Image (cartoon, helix red, strand yellow):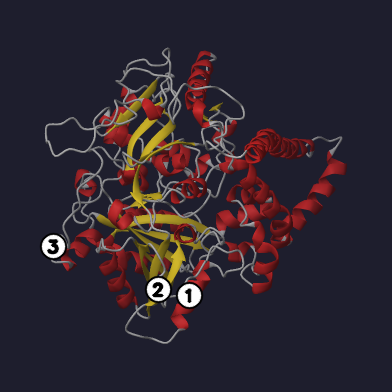
């Protein structure tokens, strides 16, 4: 078992290492250790230096700031300090009252009066979904953003972690047999809310949502798991930095991108979100705090990604930074045949000169391949398109317009502000908004209502009626399927037959973990993958990049190709034989046959044995046993299978 740290002062992650050494050419000089190094003495300090002072209104005001500005900043801080718990309490009260109302519908005394009222309300929400989202959900989301992005006293990360540790110990002492986070089910980033949260003991980690430190010298940022991509991009880009992989939806959190998976159009050179992390801090089921990286507790460091909180409770992560430029010069290449689209996309994916690579597939024969490069300014004579403005068309519709433009030998080009590019799919939730608010991309709607921002996925789920829920579960798909690049054409043909849902999102990624032949381990001959390898001459198409994580990944790439593609299918399938369970079973079988992986935020329908064939459980099982997770935390399959979700 790891050393017990729970009874000692918990050092702030930002000060857990020796002072970083300056770069040197001396090969024998000591390298800076991770700031999550648990072997260093515990020192109480704030992320920015100095002794930690616990204040409910901690704000930063630059020296020399005029008195009136100083006072104004502190008044705003005080207002937000009051509004945050009020907003949280109000939202919680609404959820509680709704749950209470549902209970009263089963009471013989109140049901005759209450049921007709709730039926009318449910019919309105179901039949006039677009109006309800526009007039009710969107304003709530605007308030959510204002309150949710307030700093939560960065200086007391240590106190919040100690609170998590104490909760775990108390719940175990009270006889809890299963633990999970107390995060409400509607906040979980999946189509369906987890029903296990109704039965298992919950650990409150909601306060862990801050940026702890931006260390420009070591080029890393240290963040808590609840920090969203929207907040992180604001803080970093304003300082001239970004992270190597910054997924596109504002609401995605650091914890979800590590415990689940995270990808962006820069993943063709940097890998998945997990491959850009240099250290994790985790509270184990015993209540002990442990910090791990590629040199310390490497088995734990490798096992946490994709573990879905089944090893411990993530409390912080250290992530690599890269210098950012304010604009992205984006090139659009319309493709009118499947072969042209495939060749253009793969060629771009294997070229690390591009900062970003993405393809939107609008039919089996039409697609637009995009490549981007960060630039310090808009080149003379080129167009600046601020796609993040509320009145701008949805990005996927804007891209589709290039298919109808005149063909030419050179790509279409425009420049986009970096933050607008990162969150280009947020306003339309890729293309899901066209089914929720059909007129949402109309000019009149965008100018009149889109200023309130897109609806939160969490509130869309919370406000779903039974009929809406049934529709989204049985008539709609949300799937991200990771397959080797050399199998992409075969995969697209298969998905076209089984789903026929468009657009499709294609995003390349390097799987920067040591390769393993899982098919050979389970003695699976896999003719599909063998045939794809044979078509490429039976050898690697391109050399691998150096791996960034130790051996033991849950998702190791096949030795044939380190480059994979995320095929994102979101929408209503048009394939005549589609069935919401049988079709997904076929898709999972195909993904297993090419040593691919299904994103677990979506429905997993396969059995436990099939799931264990898809993912490499060897290190994961050993880590769960070693760190005491087997008794109090479930396996991943138990949390992500469709039977565990409403």
Q: Counting residues from the N terminus, which is met first, the one under dot 3 or under dot 2?
A: 2
Q: Counting residues from the N terminus, which is met first, the one under dot 2 or under dot 1?
A: 2
Q: CA distance from mark 3 to mark 1?
A: 36 Å
Look at discs 3 and 1 and give the one toward the viewer.
1
Residue 407 location in percent, x, y?
38, 86
Residue tagged 2: 368
Q: For residue 75, which numbered disc appears in the image?
A: none
Q: Are marks 2 and 1 in contact (CB under 8 Å)?
A: yes
Residue 563 location in percent, x, y?
26, 57
What number of labels is visible? 3
Crowding around mark 1 (Cα neighbors within 10 Å: few <14, some 14 to 19, many 20+) is some
From the viewer's perspective, is 565 left or right of 327? left
In this rendering, is residue 379 above or below 602?
below
Crowding around mark 3 (Cα neighbors within 10 Å: few <14, some 14 to 19, many 20+) is few
Residue 463 visible within the image: no
Of the pair 630 and 338, the residue shown nearer to us: 338
Q: Residue at x 25, y 45 (%)?
A: 513
Of the pair 262 and 83, the residue shown nearer to us: 83
Residue tagged 1: 400
Task: State which quadrant residue 470 falls in.
Answer: bottom right
Task: State which quadrant residue 453 falls in.
Answer: bottom right
Residue tagged 3: 538
Q: Secondary structure at mark 3?
A: loop
Look at discs 3 and 2 and give the one toward the viewer.
2
């Amino acid at each position: 078992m790891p050393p017990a740290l729970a009874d000692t002062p918990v050092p702030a992650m930002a000060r857990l290492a020796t002072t970083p050494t300056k770069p040197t050419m001396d090969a024998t000089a000591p390298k800076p250790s991770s700031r999550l190094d648990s072997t260093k003495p515990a020192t109480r300090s704030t992320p920015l230096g100095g002794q930690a002072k616990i204040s409910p209104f901690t704000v930063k005001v630059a020296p020399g700031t005029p008195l009136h500005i100083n006072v104004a900043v502190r008044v705003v801080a005080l207002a937000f300090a009051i509004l945050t718990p009020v907003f949280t309490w109000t939202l919680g009260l609404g959820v509680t009252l709704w749950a209470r109302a549902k209970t009263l519908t089963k009471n013989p005394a109140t049901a005759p009066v209450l049921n007709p009222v709730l039926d009318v309300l449910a019919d309105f929400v179901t039949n006039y979904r677009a109006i309800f989202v526009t007039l009710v959900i969107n304003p709530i989301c605007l308030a959510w953003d204002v309150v949710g992005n307030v700093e939560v006293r960065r200086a007391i990360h240590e106190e919040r972690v100690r609170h998590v540790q104490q909760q775990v110990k108390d719940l175990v002492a009270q006889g809890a047999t299963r633990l999970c986070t107390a995060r409400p089910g509607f906040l979980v980033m999946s189509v369906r809310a987890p029903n296990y949260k109704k039965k298992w003991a919950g650990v409150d980690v909601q306060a862990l949502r801050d940026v702890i430190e931006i260390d420009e010298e070591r080029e890393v940022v240290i963040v808590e798991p609840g920090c969203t991509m929207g907040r992180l991009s604001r803080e970093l880009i304003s300082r001239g930095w970004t992270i190597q992989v910054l997924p596109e939806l504002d609401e995605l959190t650091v914890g979800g991108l590590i415990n689940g998976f995270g990808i962006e159009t820069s993943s063709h050179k940097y890998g998945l979100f997990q491959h850009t992390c240099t250290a994790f801090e985790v509270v184990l089921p015993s209540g002990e705090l442990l910090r791990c990286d590629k040199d310390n507790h490497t088995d734990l460091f490798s096992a946490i990604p994709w573990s879905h909180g089944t090893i411990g409770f993530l409390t912080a992560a250290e992530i690599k930074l890269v210098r950012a430029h304010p604009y992205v010069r984006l090139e659009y290449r319309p493709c009118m045949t499947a072969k042209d689209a495939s060749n253009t996309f793969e060629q771009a994916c294997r070229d690390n000169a591009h900062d970003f690579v993405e393809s939107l597939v609008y039919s089996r024969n039409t697609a637009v391949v995009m490549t981007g490069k960060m630039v310090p300014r808009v080149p003379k004579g080129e167009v600046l398109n601020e796609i993040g403005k509320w009145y701008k068309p949805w990005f996927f519709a804007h891209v589709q317009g290039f298919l109808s433009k005149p063909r030419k030998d050179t790509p279409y080009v425009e420049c986009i502000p970096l933050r607008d590019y990162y969150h280009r799919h947020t306003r339309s939730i890729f293309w899901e908004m066209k089914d929720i608010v059909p007129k949402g991309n109309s000019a009149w709607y965008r100018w009149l209502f889109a200023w309130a921002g897109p609806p939160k996925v969490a509130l869309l789920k919370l406000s779903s009626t039974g009929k809406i829920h049934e529709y989204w579960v049985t008539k709609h798909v949300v799937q991200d399927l990771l397959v080797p690049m050399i199998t992409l054409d075969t995969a697209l043909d298969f998905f076209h037959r089984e789903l026929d849902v468009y657009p499709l999102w294609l995003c390349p990624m390097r799987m920067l973990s040591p390769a393993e032949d899982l098919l050979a381990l389970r003695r699976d001959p896999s003719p599909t993958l063998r045939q794809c390898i044979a078509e490429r001459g039976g050898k690697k198409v391109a050399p691998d990049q150096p791996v960034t994580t130790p051996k033991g990944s849950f998702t190791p790439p096949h030795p044939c190709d380190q480059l994979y593609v995320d095929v994102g299918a979101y929408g209503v399938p048009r394939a005549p034989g589609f069935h919401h369970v049988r079709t997904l079973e076929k898709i999972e079988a195909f993904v297993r046959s090419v040593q691919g992986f299904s994103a677990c935020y979506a429905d997993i329908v396969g059995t436990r044995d099939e799931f264990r064939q898809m993912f490499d459980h060897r290190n994961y099982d050993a880590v769960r046993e070693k760190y005491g997770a087997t008794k109090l935390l479930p396996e991943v399959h138990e949390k992500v299978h469709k039977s565990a979700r409403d």
